[in-house]
Image (tube, rainbow, N blue to C red):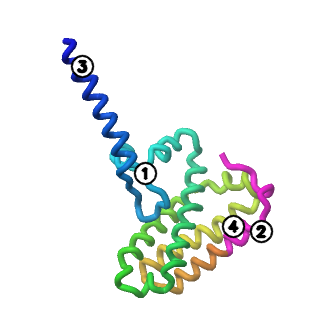
Amino acid sequence: MNSIKKILKYTFFILISIIIVGNTFIRVSDRFDDYSYGIFENIFFGKSFFEYIEVYYKSENLIKWENVSEGSNKIAEILRKNGRSICEDIELDSLRKDVGTYSKKLYLEAENTNLEYLKESNEMLPYVFSSRLKLALKLWSEGLEEKNCDKVYAGIENYNEFLLWIQSKNRDDFKTLK
């Protein structure tokens, strides 16, 4: 009986050690992430542990708002780096499709964001969010799917107008969203 307890104790210790060491040294990330997380976090949670538990302390609308704003920034950066090549270069087809799919996902998330929730932060935010940021995501997803750089650039213009509006405000003009 004692030998079984010892074996179980050592097995448990070895497994935990493997998970900690493996998670520390074997890192994963997807194409749109600026950071990496451990392989075991990916296996157990499908994302970083902290992203997994954030659902428990953030509202659904806050998560949507953060996903859309951070995701649109990542897409804009990819489009800035690649320019017209993303629509025209056959070697970038995989990236174009991935970015288009990601943009469509974010557009659907923006569609489902409660505008009254955004209004709690700033009276004009729902309007600018809908007329600029959400429209940019829609144009990007359609333009990338159709290989239509004019739509992609129209999306960039809308995104830039959204950023200019945000940057024209002071921090005090927004209440913290929860």
Residue 144 position (above or below residue 65): below
Spatial distance from mark 3 to mark 4, Cα to Cα? Answer: 63 Å
Q: Residue at x 42, y 87 (%)?
A: 88
x then y, percent, for residue 138: 53, 72
Q: Quadrant of residue 2?
A: top left
Q: Which residue is drawn at 53% across and 86% down?
A: 150
Residue that label 1 marks: 37
Spatial distance from mark 1 to mark 3, Cα to Cα? Answer: 32 Å
Spatial distance from mark 2 to mark 3, Cα to Cα? Answer: 65 Å
Q: Are marks 3 and 4 in contact (CB under 8 Å)?
A: no
> Is 53 on the left or on the right of 30, as rendered?
right
x then y, percent, for residue 30: 41, 61
Q: Residue at x 42, y 68 (%)?
A: 101
Spatial distance from mark 1 to mark 4, Cα to Cα? Answer: 34 Å
Spatial distance from mark 4 to mark 2, Cα to Cα? Answer: 13 Å
Q: Quadrant of residue 136?
A: bottom right
Residue that label 2 marks: 168
The region drawn magenta spans 161-178
Residue that label 4 marks: 128
- Mark 4 or 2: the one toward you: 2
Q: What residue type is labelled 4?
A: Val
x then y, percent, for residue 61: 59, 50
- Mark 1 or 4: the one toward you: 1
Q: Earlier in the sequence, mark 4 or mark 2?
A: 4
Q: Which of marks 2 and 3 is nearer the N terminus?
A: 3
The circle drawn on residue 6 is 3
Q: Which of marks 1 and 2 is nearer the N terminus?
A: 1
Does residue 166 belong to the magenta stretch? yes
